[in-house]
C-alpha cells in the first residue's frame, strides 16, 4: 500500500499532504531528468516521436482519473450537505410535534430533545475521523440519548387515552424520521473511493513526473517553471479532492450547514 489510511489522514489533517505531494513529484522529476541525462550522455539516447504519444497517454489517463475522483468527491460532499439540511429539518419538525402531547408530558420530552441536539452538535467536533474508536464512543452516547427520547415518547403515547392517542402517535413517525436522518448522515461520512483509486492517482502522478523529467533529461534542458507549475497544480488538485472527501478535517468545511443545528438549538 502506497500510503495507508491513517498515515494519509495524518498528513492531511496536519496540512503536510500537499508538501509531501509537491516534494515527491519534484523528486520524481529530478530522478527522471538524471536517468534521461545519463542515457543521453552514455548511450546517445534521443527523444523519439513515439515518446510524445506515450506521454500524452499517461497525462490523459491522469487527467481522466483526477476528473473522476474530483467529480465523485464533490458529489459526496454535496450529498453530505443535503443530509445535514434534511437532518435539521427532521429534528425541527419532530420538535414541533411535541405540542401534540399532553401539557404535563411536554417539558420532559423537550428536555430530552435539547440533550439529543446538544449531543448531535458535539458529535463531529474535532478531528475524530482520525480516531474511529473515539468517534464510535460519541456515536454510542448520542444513540443512547436518542433511545431515552424514543422510550419516553412511546410510553407517553401508550398512556394517552383514545381518541387523543391517534393524534399523539404522529410524533413517533417524526422522531423515527429524525433518527433515520442522523444515521444517514453518519453513514455518508464513511463513503469514500476504494483504496485502489487513491493508489492509482498517486502512482500516476509520480509516473507522469518521472516521464516528464526523463524527456527533459534526454534533451538536457530544464524548464523549472513548467515543472514547478505542474507540481503545484497536481498537488493542489489532489489536496482539494482530499478536502472534499474529508470535510470534517479539511479546509473545505461543512460548518456553514452544521451551524444550522446551533441555530435550531437556540429556538428550543
Image (tube, helix red, strand yellow):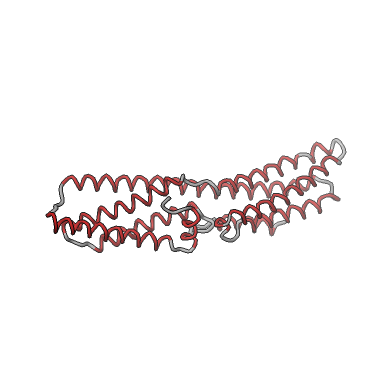
Q: Position of residue 231 (x, y in %)?
A: 32, 59
The relative height of residue 38 versus residue 100 in the rendered view (above or below) is below
Q: Residue furthest left?
A: 44
Q: Quadrant of residue 36?
A: bottom left
- Is 188 situated left or right of 219 in this image? right
Q: Residue at x 80, y 41 (%)?
A: 168
Q: Nearer the viewer, residue 111 or 190?
A: 190
Q: Position of residue 150 (x, y in %)?
A: 76, 45
Q: Residue at x 46, y 60 (%)?
A: 11
- Is 13 situated left or right of 87 in this image? left
Q: Quarter holding the C terminus?
A: bottom right
Q: How many marks?
A: 0
- Is 258 situated left or right of 268 in this image? left
The relative height of residue 94 versus residue 123 in the rendered view (above or below) is above
The relative height of residue 31 versus residue 54 in the rendered view (above or below) is below
Q: Position of residue 251 (x, y in %)?
A: 48, 60
Q: Nearer the viewer, residue 71 or 262?
A: 71
Q: Residue at x 58, y 46 (%)?
A: 187
Amino acid at each position: 500500500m502506497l500510503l495507508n489510511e491513517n498515515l494519509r489522514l495524518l498528513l492531511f489533517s496536519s496540512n503536510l499532504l500537499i508538501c509531501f505531494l509537491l516534494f515527491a513529484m519534484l523528486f520524481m522529476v529530478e530522478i527522471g531528468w538524471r536517468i534521461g541525462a545519463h542515457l543521453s550522455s552514455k548511450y546517445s539516447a534521443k527523444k523519439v516521436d513515439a515518446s510524445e504519444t506515450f506521454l500524452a497517454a499517461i497525462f490523459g489517463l491522469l487527467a481522466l482519473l483526477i476528473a473522476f475522483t474530483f467529480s465523485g468527491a464533490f458529489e459526496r460532499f454535496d450529498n453530505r450537505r443535503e443530509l445535514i439540511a434534511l437532518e435539521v429539518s427532521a429534528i425541527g419538525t419532530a420538535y414541533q410535534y411535541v405540542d401534540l402531547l399532553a401539557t404535563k408530558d411536554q417539558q420532559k420530552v423537550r428536555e430530552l430533545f435539547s440533550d439529543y441536539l446538544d449531543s448531535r452538535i458535539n458529535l463531529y467536533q474535532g478531528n475524530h475521523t482520525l480516531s474511529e474508536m473515539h468517534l464510535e464512543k460519541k456515536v454510542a452516547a448520542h444513540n443512547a440519548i436518542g433511545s431515552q427520547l424514543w422510550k419516553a415518547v412511546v410510553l407517553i403515547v401508550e398512556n394517552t387515552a383514545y381518541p387523543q392517542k391517534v393524534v399523539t402517535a404522529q410524533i413517533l413517525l417524526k422522531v423515527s424520521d429524525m433518527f433515520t436522518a442522523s444515521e444517514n448522515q453518519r453513514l455518508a461520512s464513511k463513503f469514500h473511493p476504494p483504496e485502489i483509486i487513491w493508489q492509482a492517482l498517486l502512482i500516476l502522478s509520480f509516473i507522469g513526473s518521472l516521464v516528464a523529467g526523463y524527456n527533459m533529461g534526454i534533451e538536457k534542458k530544464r524548464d523549472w517553471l513548467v515543472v514547478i507549475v505542474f507540481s503545484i497544480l497536481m498537488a493542489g488538485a489532489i489536496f482539494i479532492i482530499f478536502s472534499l472527501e474529508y470535510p470534517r478535517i479539511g479546509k473545505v468545511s461543512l460548518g456553514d450547514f452544521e451551524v444550522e443545528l446551533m441555530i435550531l438549538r437556540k429556538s428550543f
